[in-house]
Image (cartoon, rainbow, N blue to C red):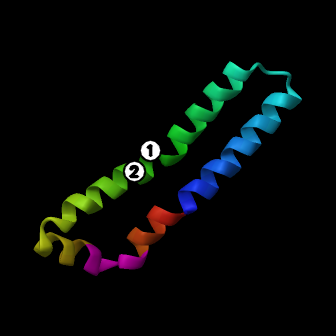
Amino acid sequence: MRHALDTGICAAKTIAAGLNHGASYSTIRDRYKQGSATRWRAKRRLGKVIREMLKHPRLTSIGLGLSPQYWFRKLWD
């Protein structure tokens, strides 16, 4: 749900900026794609690392045991 809301807000901001500058549809679309990819790249990478860690219970208990709030905040902020 958070991802959907965040990408919707990003799309609205990109469209508004594009319309204010008289950008074409393809330019606005490309800017949105670039902004969305940049915004979510690190979060997807972190999610992949956490999924891999979950396959190894001992590693998970060490990694998440140190500071679970830190890792979950990284995913949601």
At x 49%, y 47%, the residue is: 40
- Of residues 38 and 15, the one nearer the viewer is 15
**Magenta stretch: residue 21 in it?**
no
Left or right of residue 10, residue 23 in this image = right
- Of residues 1 and 27, the one nearer the viewer is 1
**Magenta stretch: residue 66 in it?**
yes
At x 88%, y 30%, the residue is: 20
- Residue 23 versus residue 16 in the image, above or below: above
Residue 34, image x, y percentages: 56, 32
Task: Quarter of the image for the C terminus: give it.
Answer: bottom right
Left or right of residue 74, residue 52 in this image = left
Label 1 secondary element: helix
The quarter of the picture where residue 16 lies is top right
At x 56%, y 41%, the residue is: 36
At x 19%, y 78%, the residue is: 61
Residue 27, image x, y percentages: 69, 21
* Amino acid beneath label 1: Arg
Name the residue carrying label 2: 44
* Amino acid beneath label 2: Arg
Left or right of residue 15, residue 26 in this image = left
Q: Range of the magenta residues? A: 64-69
Residue 41: give its label: 1
- Residue 4 versus residue 24 in the image, above or below: below
Circles 2 and 1 in contact, beta carbons < 8 Å: yes
Label 2 secondary element: helix
